[in-house]
């Protein structure tokens, strides 16, 4: 079957025939390799409008808190971590973390995304005490904390299972487990760039355990390690397989899918492959937009696709809103991990996000990490007052 025939079938998609028209891995790979970008984005935008016809683009006011940079995993693409004993290691105190949340509360924030490294010097009581302290001091803030590899490290230090660790954290007040550390759930790619993270099934298992407890979770993907298009689809296939199983067994799965290209500027992976063509490593804007479009068409059981402005910039993330994405991410009051590898823009104001959304022809909508809609003060300029009219997004499918 040709790519045009595959897209033609996808245009017939609706909620009633979704199972019959579900993309196979082979079809998604065909689209990835052969379909023109404009045709992919058009099809993905039509799917996005079918799934979310209200004309809204959601966003979150939150803050990233990287509580420690001590890590023993040594991922080649990470410029943030420092090994134990390094002169530049740090672990924030409870008071330092709480003060950062106070700054977030002052601007109407609703969530922290708190992640660090796999720090073998921190006992499990440090984590449970921290979560309980933050929950008591900041009861209106969702605490979305750690990542599967951190949970594995804590379990190893404490002698508990990962499910037991997650249960203790949930009882202490943790709201969700973000999907960091997935990168590429393909064994040979993962072994090359982060061999200490182990088999992809480890990440999937911990996320399934979190979903079984009712914790809020998200799925992520980093592209540009030199993987094939088929391997990118394989990653999405593993995400979709878990999503289907968790929705059936637990009634709760991933809230969203978030992808971005690996940053090559200052890390071991980039230095190791210095001089290679950018078409081989990394991913430019057109490749990123292609990935967003494929993910919207393929991940039909995941409600939301997020555009990544921290790695791609606001202009490209705005284009992603017209190619499958329905969420603009967050204001990200603080970010230290991706920025350590070379990104320049570290935070976006609410005005910037709203302006980007409105200029793309959508209505900005605040949310929390469960995608519940919140009261949204419109702080960006009214589109009717802009120099040029904004497009009607609903007529661009």
Image (tube, helix red, strand yellow):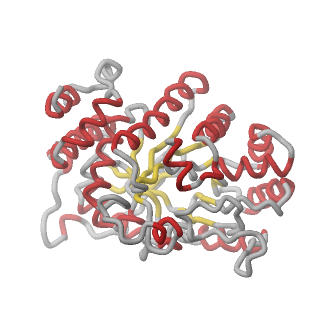
Residue 162 in the figure: left or right of residue 376: right
The reply to whether residue 355 is visible in this rendering is no
Q: Say which of 397 and 209 sits in front.
A: 209
Residue 39 in the figure: left or right of residue 227: left
Quarter assignment of residue 194: bottom right
Residue 396 in the figure: left or right of residue 230: left
Residue plotted at (50% across, 62% down): 61
Q: Find residue 146 and report its horizontal and vertical position in percent.
A: 66, 54
Q: Find residue 147 and report its horizontal and vertical position in percent.
A: 64, 51
Residue plotted at (28% across, 70% down): 381
Q: Is residue 251 above or below residue 370?
A: above
Residue plotted at (43% across, 55% down): 225
Screen quadrant of the N terminus:
top left
Residue plotted at (25% across, 35% down): 30
Q: Find residue 20 and report its horizontal and vertical position in percent.
A: 31, 18
The reply to whether residue 84 is visible in this rendering is yes
């Amino acid at each position: 079957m040709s790519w045009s025939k595959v897209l033609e079938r996808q245009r017939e998609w609706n909620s009633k025939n979704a199972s019959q028209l579900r993309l196979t891995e082979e079809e998604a790979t065909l689209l990835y390799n052969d379909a023109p970008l404009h045709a992919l984005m058009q099809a993905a935008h039509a799917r996005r409008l079918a799934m979310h016809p209200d004309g809204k683009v959601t966003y979150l006011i939150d803050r990233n808190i990287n509580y420690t940079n001590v890590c023993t995993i040594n991922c080649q693409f990470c410029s943030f971590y420092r090994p134990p004993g390094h002169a530049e290691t740090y672990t924030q105190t409870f008071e330092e973390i709480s003060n950062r949340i106070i700054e977030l509360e002052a601007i109407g924030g609703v969530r922290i995304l708190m992640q660090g490294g796999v720090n073998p010097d921190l006992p499990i009581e440090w984590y449970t005490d921290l979560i309980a302290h933050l929950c008591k001091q900041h009861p209106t803030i969702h605490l979305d904390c750690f990542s599967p590899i951190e949970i594995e490290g804590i379990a190893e230090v404490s002698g508990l299972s990962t499910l037991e660790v997650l249960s203790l954290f949930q009882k202490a007040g943790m709201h969700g487990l973000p999907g960091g550390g997935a990168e590429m759930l393909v064994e040979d790619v993962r072994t090359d760039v982060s061999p200490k993270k182990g088999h992809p099934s480890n990440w999937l298992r911990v996320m399934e355990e979190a979903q079984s407890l009712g914790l809020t979770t998200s799925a992520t993907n980093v592209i540009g390690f030199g993987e094939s298009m088929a391997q990118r689809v394989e990653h999405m296939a593993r995400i979709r397989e878990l999503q289907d199983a968790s929705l059936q067994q637990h009634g709760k799965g991933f809230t969203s899918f978030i992808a971005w290209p690996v940053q090559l500027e200052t890390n071991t992976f980039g230095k190791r492959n210095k001089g290679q063509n950018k078409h081989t490593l990394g991913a430019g804007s057109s490749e990123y937009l292609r990935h967003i479009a494929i993910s919207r068409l393929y991940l039909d059981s995941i409600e939301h696709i997020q555009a990544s402005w921290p790695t791609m910039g606001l202009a490209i993330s705005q284009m992603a809103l017209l190619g499958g994405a329905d969420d603009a991410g967050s204001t990200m009051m603080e970010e230290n991990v991706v920025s350590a590898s070379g990104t320049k823009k570290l935070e976006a104001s609410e005005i910037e996000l709203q302006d980007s959304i409105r200029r793309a022809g959508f209505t900005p909508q605040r949310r929390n990490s469960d995608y519940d809609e919140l009261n949204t003060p419109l702080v960006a300029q009214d589109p009717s007052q802009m120099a040029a009219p904004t497009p009607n997004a609903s007529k661009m499918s």
